[in-house]
Image (cartoon, rainbow, N blue to C red):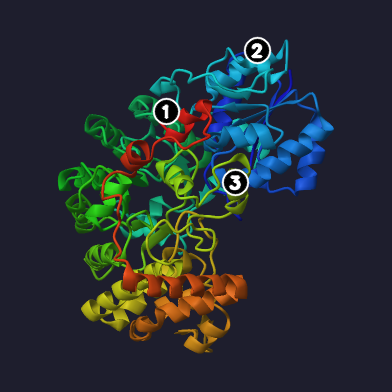
Amino acid sequence: MKVMIVTTPIRPTPSGFPPFGSLTLVKSLRDSGYDDVEFFDIDGNRPSFEQVIEYIGETRPDILGISAVVSTAYDYCKRLSLAVKEILPDTLIVLGGNMGASANVLLRETGVGLVVLGEGERVFVNIARRAEQTRAPADFKDILGLMLIDENDTLINTGYEGALPADQLYDIDWDDLEKSSDMGLYIRMHDENADAGWTEYSSHIDETRRQGKRIGLLYASKGCVSRCTFCHRWDKGIRFIPVPIFMQRLDEIIERYNVGFLQLADENFGTDKRWLKEFCAEIKKRDLIWRVGTRAKGMTLEVIEMMRDSGCASIIYGNETGSARMLEIMEKKVSIEDNYNAVKWALEAGLGSKVQLVLGMPGESPETIKETIEFCKFTNTILARQNPNDLSINYAQALPGTPLYEFARSKKLIGRDLAGEEEYLLKISDRDAHDEYTTLNFTDYPKLICETWRPLITIVVNKYYVDKFGLAQYHSVLFRDTDYFRKKDESGYFANPKRIMETSGRGQVDDGKEFIMPSLLNMVVSGRWGLALISYPNMAYRMRKALLLQVLIKDLKDYGLAHAAGLSREYLTYQVARVFKPLGFKEGYKSLRKIVDTDIGTLPGDIEAMNALRKGR
């Protein structure tokens, strides 16, 4: 039995996150007696599509497992599965990952035969055992954790397999990654200039012990204590890897790859305070600098100081908004006071932090944006050493398996039938949440107005910082964090304006090697409008009243006349309509999940087997 597990391209450039999901499948298969298992890292290696198909055709796997961690890879997965099915009709193609929430589309419109629901380690082993006798998808309908089409052309949901014990989570063999990929992509050398943030806020700053060290990445937990209405994930609840097991894995990459810096991939790190105390005590012994993301709720100054003492240099929160009303829509289960305090305490304790926002959820309005601006004015100007552009502002992206996606279907922003859903999946393929072009408008305001909100937040917050600390200090932190406008590789993790600083291009250096700010005209002519906006904060603030026109011109330049004309028509129609009809979010400021489940309910024509996937876990 030959099994191949492949990744799919997630972003325009390879992701620096090791493909733990794929690697755990490989190891679980081997542990179950399947030795002929190969990992093909398409995302990391980026071969051409023709090379991918040629190699898979030569290898001739009996089972091809496609790891699709994001729904924005739909177009690639469709092309891949159909091409493989054409040359290897007897190969069973299995898809796992969050894209599986679109199981009906995948099973009807692509070459995929089975879709795995939730964790795939146990499910995939069961698939391999059954595939020794048959590869007809209908013959797998007694295996938990699958969606498939049976012999009567009916969509079948077999339910969920039991969750893995915490000590088995993300259990991988690094040899598999070494054999298939460039390890420099996943465990790279620390760069003193590009990675200055690692040491700038660390209490463990002795650089003599950091020279030649690498940056590693591990997970310490899986899942989430919350169920944000825009977030699609399979896992129910949260499981923390026992500290002794985590430390064994950490010690392995320290020894194997000379790791001295650790990025924890968790989003809910340390919500179990007893676990966190044990973790901090153990990691402190290893003298690492580490960074992490977590929730604002439950953070205290004492906890943050404990983390800093153990080597933590940065805590990033998913604040998402500065509006209490929007927190309700998002079902963040966190108060606006939690958001304010968590960032304040992290910075005052000497740690780095960045605010991440999601704009444009249903109910977003100029009033909620003003509340978010006030939040960011506070959080991003607490200390002079902060860069006020340490903001990552995404738009709400409707992903299958979320209340936001179902809200969009109910409003007919996404087609309700099979063709309409696939059309949307193709539209957002290879598009990130920071992309304003494919972002749907869930608000009561025209899209043109919505597109002004992100630059407006940046403009007002930067001006507030300049007024508080001065233009010279602003330029100092801007130059520091852009490495003097030298072009760097995009992490793929942040949206604008933080993303602009990562991709700022080249600065100018005179004969005396002194840095010179690129001219405003140069930036505008070269199309670097975002960089001009953050480089000249006073000018940007004076021009903010013309932001609507600026955004329209940018849309015209980037997306063409038809798109810009459509935005203009919608805006003019809105201006006329508002004279006769008052605006207001009629659904009310409560969890979008309640709005979808209670106020809207199941949409006509929806297939019962898909209902559990549409609601998420």
Q: Residue 425: x, y in percent?
A: 59, 47
580 left or right, relative to 126: left
Are the two marked residues, 2 and 1, in contact with CB atoms closer than 8 angstroms? Answer: no
Q: Residue 504: x, y in percent?
A: 50, 71
Q: Residue 422: x, y in percent?
A: 62, 44
Q: Quadrant of the C terminus?
A: top left
Are the two marked residues, 1 and 3, in contact with CB atoms closer than 8 angstroms? Answer: no
Q: CA distance from mark 1 to mark 3?
A: 48 Å
Please state which of residues 386 and 539 is positioned toward the viewer in this rendering.
Answer: 539
Disc 1 target residue: 248
Residue 53, numbered circle = none
Q: Element type at marker 2?
A: helix
The vertical placement of 141 against 56, above or below, is: above
Q: CA distance from mark 3 to mark 2?
A: 36 Å
Q: What residue is drawn where x is 50% and y is 50%?
A: 412
Q: Element type at marker 1?
A: helix
Q: Amino acid at mark 1?
A: Gln
Q: Amino acid at mark 2?
A: Arg
Q: What residue is drawn where x is 30% and y is 75%?
A: 460
Foreground mark, 3 or 2, reads 3
Residue 129, numbered circle = 2
Residue 420, numbered circle = 3
The numbered mark, 1 or 3, whose residue comes first in the sequence reads 1
Q: Determine if residue 560 is in view.
A: no
Q: CA distance from mark 2 to mark 1?
A: 31 Å
Foreground mark, 1 or 3, reads 3
Q: Determine if residue 525 is in view.
A: yes
591 left or right, relative to 232: left
The vertical placement of 105 against 494, above or below, is: above
Residue furthest front in the image:
580
Q: How many marks?
A: 3
